[in-house]
Image (cartoon, helix red, strand yellow):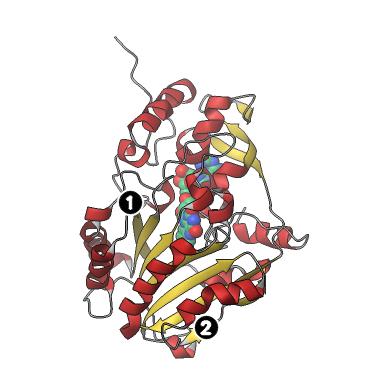
Amino acid sequence: MLWSDVIAKAAAVGLAPLNGSNPTVGVSGYTLGGGLSPTLGRSHGYAADHVRWFDVVTADGKLQHVDAESEPDLFWALRGGKGNFAVVTALEFDLFPVPRLYGGGLYFPGERTADVLRTWAAWHPNTPETMITSLAMMRMRSMPPVPEPLRGKFLVSVRIAYNGTVADGERLVAPLRAVAPSLLDNVRDMPYSEVASIHNEPTDPVPYYERGIMLRDFPAQAQDKLIELVGPDSETDLVMAELRALGGAWDREPAVPNAVSTRGLPYSLLAVAAGPLSQEEQLKRSVAELLDGMKPWQGDRRFVNNLAPDEAADATAIYGPERYERLASIKKTYDPANMFRLNHNVLPAATPD
Ligand SMILES: Cc1cc2nc3c(=O)[nH]c(=O)nc-3n(C[C@H](O)[C@H](O)[C@H](O)COP(=O)(O)OP(=O)(O)OC[C@H]3O[C@@H](n4cnc5c(N)ncnc54)[C@H](O)[C@@H]3O)c2cc1C
């Protein structure tokens, strides 16, 4: 099932899920990987924090109902450990009474990148948890469906999802609107069903390569470095570098703790390159140039949903040593032969000699 299905059905009764930026993403993989919702996550936490139960098929072929009481270890590991533990056939999660948002995007011309970035970085920490925001530097294509004023341009876009009144939303966003005249400003009162328009990502298949890291800090030097690497005067061919501001409920352990590893890290940084398979090596190089350049500020854990599927990431580094040890021990119980290994693999804990 895709998020678009859930959003439509929930919106019909005035409710909203903790969906991601793009409605074409699948519910299961997203939620098992944590599920970082750029529309409600800062106030509500990760999607994985709100799962009530799963039905799964474990590696031994058994159909099992998994919740906090019946299978507490597996329930902990599934929520954040992604595809390592079982095949999920059904899940139930909370929805929230959010019929409308004040949201959309402010698109500024590339030459104002430094002003917008610095203002945004100083602004968002002082906003309430109901204000969720990200900033993207983007090289737009010169063709539809890109709106006419944005075609072929380098842009910096600030995304807004505010769950509150329009008057408060306008007041909160005013310092951003004051930075520079925008090329497009579609931040508005909207029904939750229009949530995809905030990030406005492609919904048709496009060949791309992306991966991300977490940042533990984003001081002025890191801001300068980001502009140097992907700003308007850089030579990068990335189509997008996206910085999401986290904190709030994303940092708090849920009532029933889980394996999500990125609490306490204040930013996610995603690098996206687009092009045909024949350019794969170049796309990967462009992504690496940005992420390697930002290494001095990289956090000590990774967000599993932002790893490239083929990335040879060390799972200990994704989860941190203690969380990894517990995952490995649960893996040994539920998948000792490592059947579920085509992923960012948690190895079953070794049996002591
Ligand atoms: C355009 C775009 C926007 C995105 N935005 C966000 C975002 O805002 N927040 C965020 O957190 N992530 C985001 N993601 C990342 C997304 O959450 C991951 O790519 C996730 O893996 C997608 O899951 P899927 O079910 O769609 O994909 P699939 O390719 O079907 O699955 C990916 C992996 O998830 C696991 N998996 C999937 N289904 C099951 C199942 N039923 N049982 C067990 N394991 C399963 C498996 O390991 C599988 O290999 C985005 C991705 C894209 C492409």
Query: Picture coordinates of residue 294 (x, y %)?
Result: 25, 59
- The amino acid pointed to by label 2 is Asp
**Residue at the spot x=36%, y=59% of the render?**
269
Q: Nearer the viewer, residue 217 or 268?
A: 217
Locate residue 109 relative to residue 49 in the image: left or right. left
Alpha carbon distance from label 1 to label 2: 30 Å
Residue at the far right: name it. Answer: 13
Q: Quadrant of the C terminus?
A: top left
Proximity of marks 1 and 2: CB atoms separated by less than 8 Å: no
**Residue at the spot x=27%, y=67% of the render?**
226
Residue 268: mark: none
Locate residue 215 relative to residue 2 in the image: left or right. left
Counting the numbered discs, the total is 2
Query: Picture coordinates of residue 254 (x, y %)?
Result: 56, 39
Locate residue 216 relative to residue 99 in the image: left or right. left
Query: Picture coordinates of residue 266 (x, y %)?
Result: 40, 53
In the rendered image, which quarter is residue 65 located in?
top right
Specify few, some or many for label 1: CA neighbours under 10 Å numbering under 14, 14-19, or 20 or more.
Answer: some
- Disc 1 on helix, strand or loop? loop
**Residue at the spot x=44%, y=44% of the render?**
263
Q: Nearer the viewer, residue 267 or 57?
A: 267
Disc number lying in front (1 or 2): 1
Residue at the far top: name it. Answer: 353
Q: Is residue 231 above or below residue 319?
A: below
Q: Residue at label 1?
A: 216
Q: Residue at label 2?
A: 185
Q: Is residue 300 above or below residue 132?
A: above
In the rendered image, which quarter is residue 243 located in?
bottom left
N-term-proximal mark, 1 vs 2: 2
The answer to whether residue 297 is seen in the rendering is yes
- The amino acid pointed to by label 1 is Arg
